Image: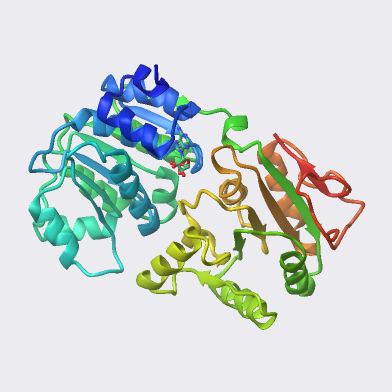
Amino acid sequence: MNKFSELGLSRPLVVALEKIGFTQPTPIQLQSIPQILAGRDLMASAQTGSGKTAAYALPILECLLDPETMPRALVISPTRELALQVQEQFERFGTEMKLRSVAVYGGTGFDSQTRALKKGVDIVVATPGRLLDHVERRHVDLSGVEILVLDEADRLLDMGFMPQVRRIVSGLSLERQTLMFSATIDEQVERIAAQYLTEPVTVRVNPEQVEPSEISQVVYRVNEFDKDSLLVKLIKENEMPSVLVFTRTRMRADWVCDRLNESSIVCEPIHGDISQVNRERTLLRFREGKLKILVATDVAARGLDVPAISHVINYDLPGNPEDYVHRIGRTGRAGRSGIAMSFISEDEGYLVREIERLLGKKLDPDSQVRKKLPPRRFSGRGSGMASARRLG
Ligand code: AMP
């Protein structure tokens, strides 16, 4: 018997999952799906990459079953990219059902979203600001929402969306079921949970399950001014089918792209100064493998769902250690192996220590041996590489 049907999902979903090729539920799915189907409120700590979207999308589809005229499920997400990807997953899992979903987000025209909302949808996946605009213009009535999901609750908080979220939630029925997903759970997240959830079950996937085990983490101690040449060298000398390069700022993303282009390496930046249309176009080419290298900021890459990234390169280390885990989680998805490379300049040493504290292990076990450049063909298995280490 299919493992997903054992969790209580019925035939249309099991068939769709078989077609997609999902055979084994991930740990977060194993723990969450039965609880959500039982009608419980839920607080889950889970990262992107853990399968968290399916952990709520599948039981939501199961609960809704047949289409109606008003939205019955609402997912609030911090970014447009995440909203789009989540809605795509609803579509993907719902191919054998008649439920309709729409992604509602800012930075693009109102018309097509308004039309979709007025035609009647069952599932709305939205960023807070734009959803509130639609609610205030009476394009959508959320009073029939039975299941609310706050996805990436920590990000919603960080990005300052809570005032809008509060206004949206105040218009929902108190009878609803509420699910919260968050990569990190701190006091603020707990306060929101206490406010919005009723006798929730708590689901945590333990850190080994969060930090994908198939990721080799490699550290390069490098002078700030040598980062560009190191990056060019790494890209030219290694086989890298799909690379996500992270920089600290939008300007630096553009700068790095220009340096790579100058060295005849094709790449595109993705960040908040680039129009939504262009971001989506770039992302699609990257997903389809037509574009091999993407240079991104953390915000732009948040929730980015590209299953086949082979290399994540931290041109700059992130300002907080959780983002490091987020970033490297972009590779090594769903059992694939991946490589995360981090450039560390003299003044980024303290960031390394914070990351190591979070991971509970050394990132750079051999830091005395400061290898600046990789061997000609890097196997990704850490062999012959003084500062490479396999974690997990
Ligand atoms: P998420 O954590 O929701 O961003 O999902 C991470 C990736 O894992 C996505 O590409 C999903 O399509 C994929 N995924 C989710 N659940 C499963 C599963 N049970 N088996 C295989 N892949 C999965």
In-front residue for pair 23/322: 23
Q: Give the vertical position of 306 relative to 28 (above or below).
A: below
Give the residue drawn at x 9%, y 39%. 68
Q: Position of residue 354 (x, y in %)?
A: 69, 47
Q: Answer with left or right where residue 378 lies relative to residue 215.
A: right
Which of the 4 quarters of the picture holds residue 16?
top left
Left or right side of 76 for 375? right
Q: Quadrant of residue 347?
A: bottom right
Q: Residue furthest front?
A: 19
Viewer can see residue 200 = no
Res. 236 in view: yes
Percent across and percent down for residue 185 are 48, 37
Relative placement, left or right, of 259 versus 272 is right
Front residue (pair 115, 92): 92
Image x and y of residue 362, in percent = 78, 41
Colouring: rainbow
Q: Residue at x 30, y 43 (%)?
A: 90
**Quadrant hosting residue 334:** top right
The residue at 38%/56% (across/down) is 79
- Residue 356, placed above or below residue 66: below
Name of the residue lying farthest toward the bottom: 262
